[in-house]
Amino acid sequence: MADPLRRDVLMHRGIFVAVALFLIFLRLLPLGSEAGRLPGPDLLLCLILAWVQRRPDYMPALLIVAVVLTEDMLLLRPPGLWTALVLVGSEILRSRIALTRELSFATEWIFIGLLMFGMFLGYHLVFAVTLLPQAGFGYAMTQAVATVLAYPVVVWLSHVTLRVHKPGMGEVDSMGRRL
Amino acid sequence: MAKNRTNPEDFARPIRRILIGALVVLLLALFLLWRIDSPRVERFRTALVDRTVPSFDWVMLPVTKAVQMVQGFQSYTKLYEQNQELRQELKQMRGWKEAALRLEQQNAKLLDLNQVRLDPKLTHITGVVLADSGSPFRQSVLINVGERDGVRDGWAAMDGIGLVGRISGVGRRSARVILLTDSSSRIPVVVEPSGQKALLSGDNSSAPPLEFVEKADLVRPGDRVVTSGDGGVFPAGLLVGSVAQGPDRRLRALLAADYERLDFLRVLRSHDLEAITDPGGLVAEPVTPGEIGPPPPAEGEDSNG
């Protein structure tokens, strides 16, 4: 009884790492990176927030930190800053699971959208405070908008292909506690 | 919703909150460390990228090729128009070729007259582009030559035509090239016919602006931009691009290198210039540091005159 559930959690964590590596790998491909192109959505952020919102037990904080820090390192971003922001964002979400669990998807989307905008703004702001050279404000906001728009797609895809959904009333975890 | 107070989760929650806080502080400390002592963290990053990315090579190649094939199929539709355009261009080029040949002969004659010696040490290594940085805000590519091939920091990288960027970060098997369009790239350049010096500073757009032009009036759109060799960063005279004026009246450089197709990069092996330290006894007194302006007469006596 307890074993299959535990295995399910481990399997989903493995899938998350694989998908994250795949997304980083896509970014690394030497295709289409001319300067001045509009930035696409940050799909990894969508994935993390969507899964934390649905199944927080799939996404332990350390796993999130490890994956995003790897992304920071490989994509030549300042290491640690974006990771810290993602960690704080996911913890904000995690601590409000009990409140947001009953909400409709539209409300959840608005909430997550605000959270994402906050994270991108914070990132931009820290760059400004530490006098780092950075891209224009418009670009950062374009990326934020694209990410917010991509969120429902990621949610839908992970629901259809991996059955990541909000747990129903009767579901229990490996220790027999309610989810 | 009502939970039993003996649930172990209730005790674990505050501890967890403290641990998460510590983790955030740790990450921010890492960021600050990077901001303060960037070279050390960047060395670590270079080592990491050097270990991981080349081992992805076998997956990257087929995917890249497949996408390029799809793009190739898409371009078949435009092939006829392109063909016509190319024919016209070819006609114009024939004319230019004649002009170029004549100029080349003239140039050779003039060089001969002046007895100019071109630098024989200016040779190159060619590398294949492995990966680009990926994020839209960092413009850099990774090439497959590194320390093993003698590549050093600061060398210039070109494609067949123009300057592409500068080596910044060398691993054993790979090296990173910061492109001219990156927002941290600053290259001293000269605008050719007028000889105006300027700084080409990348800003993440495809045409980086020219800054600190001495007399902007003398610079016309269409002028050639080449590296100036100031500051010993680059060898002088590498083609960068041509001047253009944007709608915001700023002078920008249209880059000569084809940034959409960075496949092979040529890394110029530039050797350290010998610094000239001796001022030459006959020309002037040696300038001692800290002495600015005319020297006081009493102290000027004992140095050789």
Image (spheres, rainbow, N blue to C red):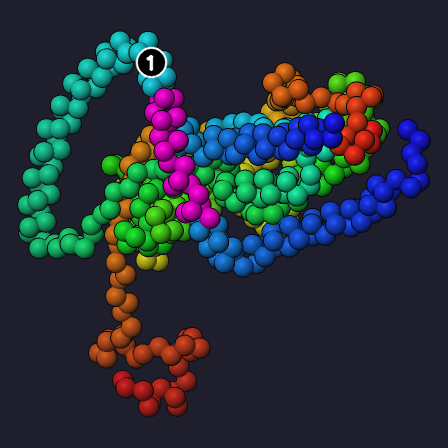
Q: Chain of mark 1?
A: B
> Magenta residues: mostly which secondary structure?
helix
Which quadrant of the view contains residue A106? top right
Is residue B54 highlighted in magenta? yes
* Magenta-drawn segment: B48-68
- Residue B194 pos. (x, y %): 29, 44
Residue depicted at 59% across the width and 57% down the height: B33
Q: Residue B85 at what x, y percent from top left?
A: 25, 14
Image position, residue B277 (x, y; %): 29, 73
A59 vs B88, left or right, is right
Q: Nearer the viewer, residue A81 or B212?
A: A81
- Quadrant showing the N terminus of chain B: top right
Quarter of the C terminus of chain B within the rendering: bottom left
Q: Residue at x 23, y 79 (%)?
A: B281
Q: Residue at x 13, y 24 (%)?
A: B95
Residue located at (27% from left, 51% from top): B149
> Viewed as shown, does residue A176 lie left or right of B39?
right
Q: Position of residue A109 (x, y in %)?
A: 72, 22
Mark 1 = which residue?
A: B73
Q: Secondary structure at mark 1?
A: helix
Q: Quadrant of residue B96?
A: top left
